[in-house]
Amino acid sequence: MNTDQMETSKSLLGPQTVDMLLQVHEDSLWMLENMGVGCTQPDMLAAFQAHEADGKAIVYEDRVYITADLVSECLAKVPGVAEFFVPRNSFFIGGTAPYVYDDAAGQGGVIPTVDHLIRIAQVAEASPVVAGMGRGIKLKDEVEQMNTMIEHCSKPLYYAVTSDRSLQRATEIYARRGKEMIVFCLTRPCLQVNENFSEFFVKVVRAGLPVFISAMPLAGISAPYCYSGVLAMTHAEVLFGICASQLLRPGHTCIHAGYPTIADPRFEYNPNYGLRSNSILNLLMAHLNMMLDLPTFQSACTTNEEHLTERALEDARIGQAFCKKYGFHMIRHAFGFLRHLVDFSFAKLEQAIQIAEEVTAEEAPDFEMPVYDERGMASIQRVGLGMYMEDSLTTANIGKVFVD
């Protein structure tokens, strides 16, 4: 634990909320030991099987069960926040929109091009408030995406690697620049490794490239419908990835990119990224990780607006004010995205950057910080690896937590 950060978090969030976060960590350890994580990737399984003899892990029927002792040993090996190449309180142009928003026509669905990516990279390079960038939009060719990003942006970057060709290029870039992160959504609901990415996760770790480990359980669908419950599910999934990386390559740089999200029954239980609670939930995830001294990369300042409305810009302002008030390490999706992160708007990118330059912590609205809800862990023990949509906690909490 980073005791200085713990005291800072107490002063910003309140002692009861910090107690909640510490209990979330304990709940996640319980989940890893008692529920396990489904996995068939041979190298990962072998890494955990090596600890069966000392009783720190069990692999049974393609599920990996990890003890708290082994998690603690792995966390102790991860290079801390102060050793990481991105400073605290860094906003990124991140995410991967499948489409570009036509700001002149007021509609989305434009297929991204290299020229769009160049424009994003140039904005990132020119804007002091932007610390770095993810892909922003997705090109079909990963290597072309990497080459375009490094040509036009000298700041820290993150992107995907899903082929040997892109792995080779990413390794060359990292050897020269040393400030890249490779993004993996390693798990899928609930507590199951996404085997579409697991092979390259192992290859990237063994190549020594920093891994950006994302997980996004959805409260009310794949996680309990309360703060502590969805945080615990998210944290457990990312902790699995961190442990796997440390067993494969001790001391490897890992970024906890757990991204707890919230289902909204008003929108057919799709994620609502515009809720004030969404930004707070992700900032709470960041504070837990900073107390654990883990580099951490969350999502905030987003919107549920389909178009570039005044509400979309107000969502950005409120999210950025929350970030400045409570502090964080890295935040993605902070500028250009519209509803469901599907469309990337350049007008929103430019206006949200201007807002970030001007907004202050004093503009953050009052928010009642959550405390530990024992019903979240009871829900996990009751539902387990199932879906949480019909769980009694979900029906009891709709409209009472996760507020606008």
Image: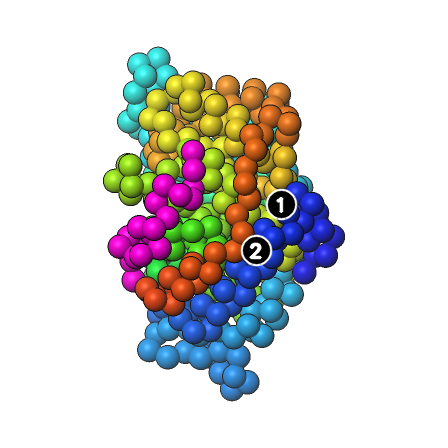
Residue 316 bears which disc, if any? none
Residue 21 bears which disc, if any? 2
Q: Give the camera-side residue of 82 and 204.
A: 82
- Residue 191 seen in render: no
Q: Is residue 375 above or below residue 276?
A: below
Question: Which residue is denoted by mark 1 in the rendering?
Answer: 13
Image location of residue 217, percent across then percent down = 39, 52
- Asked whether the residues under the numbered discs 1 and 2 touch, taking CB atoms below 8 Å apart as contact, a structural biologist would say yes
Q: Residue at x 43, y 74 (%)?
A: 34
Image location of residue 144, percent across then percent down = 42, 37
Q: Quadrant of the N terminus?
A: bottom right
Mark 2 burial class by Cα count in 10 Å: few <14, some 14-19, many 20+: many
Q: Residue at x 57, y 55 (%)?
A: 21
Q: CA distance from mark 1 to mark 2?
A: 10 Å
* Magenta-drawn stretch contains 106: no
Q: Amino acid at mark 1?
A: Leu
Q: Amino acid at mark 2?
A: Leu
Image location of residue 22, percent across then percent down = 59, 59
Q: Residue at x 26, y 55 (%)?
A: 390
- Residue 272 seen in render: yes
Start and end of the magenta stretch?
385-404
Principal secondary structure, stretch drawn in magenta = loop
